[in-house]
Amino acid sequence: MKVIKLIIVVFTIFFTTTSCDKEFLDVSPKGQFLSENYYADQGQAFSALVGVYDVLRKNSGGFENMIAMMNAGSDDQFAGGGGASDGAGIQGFSNYTLNPVIMPESFWNDHYQGIFRANTILLKVPSTTMDESLKARYLAETKALRALYYFNLVRLFKNVPLLLDPLTATNMYEVTQSSPAAVYAQIEKDLNEAIANLPATVPLSTEAGRMTKGAAQAILGKALLYQNKGAQAAAVLAEVNGTPGGTSQYGYKLLGNFDDLWVASNKFHSENILECSHSSAGNSDWGWWGAGNDEGNTLNVMVGPRSYALTEGSLAPDLPSGWSFNVFTQDFYNVMKGDPRFHATIFDLKELSTLGQANYIGGYQNTGYFLNKFLPRRADVRTGGGALELNYRQNTPIIRLADTYLMEAEALGGTGPRAQALLDAVRNRAGLSSVPVSLAAIKAERRLELAGEGHRFFDLVRWGDAAAKLADRGFKSGKNEIFPIPVRELNGTKLVQNPGY
Amino acid sequence: MLKSLTKSFLLLVLLFTTSFTFAQRNVSGVVTDAKTNEALIGANVLVKGTSIGTITDVDGAYSLSVPGADAVLVISYTGYSDQEITVGTQSTINVTLSEGAYLDEVVVIGYGIQKKSVVTGSIASLKTKDLENVPSARVEQALQGRVSGVTIAQNSGQPGSASTIRIRGITTFNDAGNSPLWVIDGVVVDAGGIGFLNQNDIESIEVLKDAASAAIYGTRAATGVILVTTKKGKEGKLNISYNGFAGSSSPAKVLKLLNASQYAAIMNERAVAGGGDPLFPNINLGVGTDWQKQIFNYGAKRYSHELSVSGGSGKSTFYVSAGIQDLEGIVTSDISKYNRKSIRLNSTHKLSSIFTFGQTLGYAHTKDSGIGSTDEYGGVLSSAINLDPTTPLVVTDPALANAAPYSSNPVIRDTNGNPYGISSLVGQEMRNPLAYVQTRLGNHNWADDFVGNAYLEAAITSNIKIRSTLGAKRAYWGNLGWTPVHYLSATSNTLQNSFGKSENKVFNWNIENTITFDKTFTDHHVTLLLGQGAYKENVGGSIGTTIFNLPVNSFEDASFNFDIPQTNRSTGTGDFIEHKLTSLFTRLNYNYKEKYLFTGIIRRDGSSRFGSNSRYGVFPSVSMGWVLSNEEFWDQNGLINSLKVRGGYGVVGNDAIRDFGYLSTVAGGVNYTVGNSGVITTGYSNTTLDNPDLRWEETSQTNIGFDAELFRNLTFTMDFFKKSTSGILRPIRIPGYVGVNQDPVGNVANMDNKGLEVELGYKKKIGDLNLNINGSMSYLKNEVTLITTDSSATFIPGGASFQSMGEVTRTAVGQSFNSFYGFQTNGIFQNLAEIDAYKSADGALIQPNALPGDFKWKDINGDGKITNDDRTFLGSNLPKIVYGITLNLDYKSFDMMIFAQGAAGNKIFQGLRRLDIGNANYQTEALSRWTGEGSSNTFPRLTSNDTNGNFSRMSDFYLEDGAYTRLKLVQLGYTMPASWSGKISSSKIRIYATAENLLTFTKYTGYDPEIGGGVFGIDKGYYPQARSFIVGAQVQF
């Protein structure tokens, strides 16, 4: 019977220790933090700030990136790609059949993710124990980024909820859209607050890509221009631009050679005011393509020709192949032909192919005119892990000095000696002689100078020229100036769809 | 390691055999069948409590030395009831054995066994004899078509690949959560991890289908439980058994694709129709390259050898086995192989009159090579299907071979130094499959699995047993991958070689303690089980390293010992998240005179995957049975010999969801490249919103069934069930403006499965002919009954997708899970008049841009336009009916088995042709395309400018009937006369020939209608199952 007793004792111990021991079931989330403990020190505040910067990658990272998308809807470029259904969203924007269902959600979601992260910082970091001046800078950067994301949202969707605090499970369905004016007011407020605390310059090796006074002012100037506040816009942009053709107070200066803008190794040069930063060191792979840890430039592979191969003895550049998106229209080719910026802008594979220098397989809407500014380059094919297609490292400009020159000239109404000087500076760098400044001249210059950088559609809408220029694509006035709100945002919420969709 | 283990096994065998003793008296006799008086060959004759025993010879005769007059002989024979006879003074003992009644079998029910005649739940059972003739590489395949209610589809024909198993349909929305719980000798093993098991080692497999049976496994039982019991040694003579076979496999079907001339003509037509120039000035190009022929192996080899030794003395029994299996795949066999070596040791030891100690331990080493990508993005099959037949396999023309792209790139060459052809027409990931093979040589996966348990059982009184079991699994797995510098196409190339390996290890353990009280009070029989368990799984992690730019360029020369700079190394290391459970459970089995049966189960589980608000779940079940045929009033007629009706209800759970679904954590991975050096800075953010109220997903199930025996030789089992899953765990689609990068998990949907299952068995002896037929059939209907992924949802978007087509399935209320979803075609416009006649109510053309030869789309919502809103549900990928039939025939020394299985009531998405590759080849169906009025009403015109979306839209055009019947196995065996086998002291020698996958009857136009995977029935260039012919031998000593 001793044995029985022993067994019973053993059993009792088991029942009481393992089964009823709640600690046994506690598993810690290895490699993650609990949200109530986070944002406690300077290091964590900085990591959270990097999370807000992460969304800047939207400019040219991931399949659904701003440049490729916005180019597709302009009159200069087609969506292209492998076929008529290669990317329903980009195709739908290109032929103006976008609807709430095929509207790529990420253009909405990603910006709101940046805003959520910014709002969380603005809520938590003020009470973080850290150096106060550094804290002020972090908060300024956060506000500048939040302003930029709202600026993109209001331009893309116009009627968006203005959220300044992180939502919770209990209040998330109570949200309504704010007027564009209210959103713009917040953008101006955030930027003005940010400008006061942002550094004029940052050390390039460690901090390049972070928000500076000049970058925030450039965004502010642009936002003012979009609200038709010309005088205010011109004043802010003048701060950024300084003397046309010279070096501005923040060190901005046009590069001498237009071609140098598109060299991948030429990062954070003096012309770029705000840059989307990419790296080949992320070993990015298909499994997390477009997610927060994908640091590659996807635009590069998207605009490359399909199955590009040199012929024997060819002198054409050796390029990695791509997916044939964003091919230029014949119309744009005709306009660009003869401009000194032609070869930097258009890779004329039609000609090379006719000359027997290279073979490729034409994609959808193929014209043979590829976007040379962002073509993938053999030298930039990554060495290391990950998918070759997803690890290009070319940074892309979000705002560059030629852009702010032309914006200031436009804000000045396209007249006057300063507007003339600004326009001349851009043309002069390209190797062109002066033309009399006018709004029409500025528009023409923007089209050529900034071709394929994702600005054209916004410009056409801002100028009121979209209906005329895009009618043959199916553009409808009063509807297609903005995107439909993705259908998911309307399910069970108080949001209202944009007119016409 | 392997060697030393084998050595110790041999030692053990030696130990057991030497303990045999010899005795004084001789007894002999003949064992015969009670009914037919025929001799029973190979019956066991054993002196009870000793290891003295023998087997009857070909005349049924035996002769044996026994220790004394009080010795008791135990005579047993499979399928017959045992007999015990005290020797006394007799020297000749003739024995007659009666066939055991079918219902006298026992089944394993989890933490115990039960007589099948008193089981109240729905449990399907397979025994050794059902398994031993099926030459499957993995155990799941042996279940296919043999038990009702279980749908099995192979994930791939790649040797050693797993199958997708669904017990009574799909239980939940998440793929991993739908696999049944595998319990091998009491150790929970994940579905992917059962590959280590050697089928020859299995004593029985029980499938607990209904909740009333499965509830004993509580929180993880919602998808059904599969219990595997491995073989134990039996007291008596040493039993040595060998089974080996060798054979050859070939593809069962090849697709009919366009040859070069046909292709050129079609491509020209297509290009011209799209407004372009013809691609081929000359279309007389002969047949061109048959890519399929290049990748298929019509003589893929396979072999298997299994040896087992079992036996036991009065105190101990043991079973040891060793096996090796080797298979070559039928697709590019150089990179498609599977090899498994396994050993097993099971033993039990009677320590004293109270204590018994037992253990099982299985070990397997598996090595396999896969063909890499098996989808449409670069899979070997996909390439063979899509590549144009005009590209040569190997370029032999020096003018071509010395020009670009061959001259300027590191292209792959054949043994003669000629480059493999590169298509200039079909680009993207499609690549010369033979060249691709050269870039993958040497790559392989490997796994080492140890699974075992040990228990100590104390029979405290004759009624009370206490048992403590410790089970554990230790697994290591990983892969080794080599990529040389290569140029397969403009899209698929690299100028840096790389060598990578990954290693994972995991440790799972559990401890279970049970007390069983078993007592008969006159007519009342009670078995009460009380138990407690604790489980810890997923303790471990993974490490992986890839190095680039090695100074060598072949797999053989590659090594991690090369001094590769840090910039050319990439590593990935991770910890697994532990998963823990604690449980208390109890089960009461009660019966009155084996007439009225009752089973009740309660299990309470706590899981680490849930928040503190609902960490514990309680899962109860009851089931009852009534054996009518045991009632006094039952007329023992010849019609219905036995009849049991049973019914049960129970609730079971599922915690196969993501870890920490209830928590908002702050995680890294929202990174940005700060600074101009390309260094990536890690960013952190809140991943999602909290949901502390996350609760268990619950599956309740009602089961009603009966078991009957008719006409003395027909068994008939039927079950009806309704299984309802509520609170299905899935991410809730919250609005994007909330701004979290992961949707929080919530309990968001309900789903029902209703079904009917029938199992039939028929046995008949006609002279020397033994006939045995078993059939099973299941009908299943799956329906989603509620979805609340957001506050107004009626469907869940983002089901299975296909290339640029986007979603091809959708899950919606009132439909089965992941139903096909798309446009409906309504014939083809034969002429302009038909297009002009297709008008909406207000007179506008519905398809103004269509041309003759385009599909006429149904305007489902009647708005006069064809938009995405005109998509509708087009059928289910889940077979409504699955069935199998096995026929066994024995005639004297010959035996034959025929096994057929099939499925019906499902559709298959045939997506073999790449959408975005205009010049991809077509199947010969394209020859009957629309070419003019009246030419076709089903296959539209071909054009490079498919403005009507004939091919780019998901529609019923892509769906085909997935019904099939497959003659899975035909086996012919011959057992040698004892006079021959006796010459090598063998008790039995059987030789056999098997044809596997001989014939498949189906209308499906792809390779194989059996397509598993997360969503059944999506064919993107699926590795088809092989047809094999094998010959083998079984030898017993």
Image: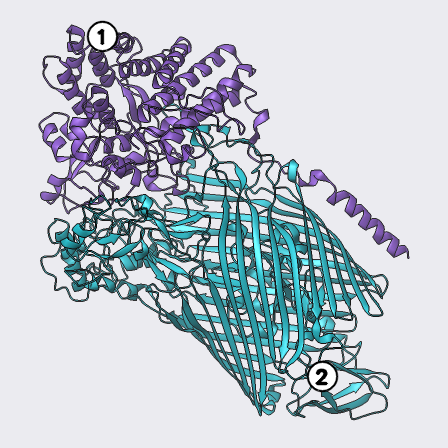
Chain colours: A purple, B cyan
Counting other residues with Cα less than 10 Å from the Cα at mark 1, is it few (<14), some (14-19), or many (20 or more)? some
Residue B160 visible in rendering: no
Q: Is residue A194 above or below residue B1037?
A: above
User: What amino acid is labelled 2 in the image?
Assistant: Thr
Q: Residues within 10 Å of mark 2 (few under 14, many from 20)?
A: many
Report whether residue A89 is seen: yes
Amino acid at dot 1: Thr
- The relative height of residue B576 versus residue A67 in the rendered view (above or below) is below
SS at circle 1: loop
The reply, left or right, for residue B601 in relation to residue A396 is: right
Judging from the image, mark 1 belongs to the subunit labelled A
The tag on residue B54 is: 2
Indicate the quadrant where residue A397 lies.
Answer: top left
Task: Tell me what residue is drawn at x 79 percent, y 77 percent.
Answer: B50
Closer to us: B838 or B875: B838
| Residue sitting nearer the eye, B706 or B577 | B706
Q: Residue at coordinates 82% horizontally, 70% vertically from top-left?
A: B523
In the image, which disc is placed on residue A243? 1
- Please tell me which residue lies in front, B574 or B76: B76
Q: Image quadrant for the C terminus of chain B? A: bottom right
**Label disc, if present, on residue B424 of the rendered structure:** none
Horizontal and vertical percent position of residue A256 = 19, 18
Q: Quadrant of the N terminus of chain B?
A: bottom right
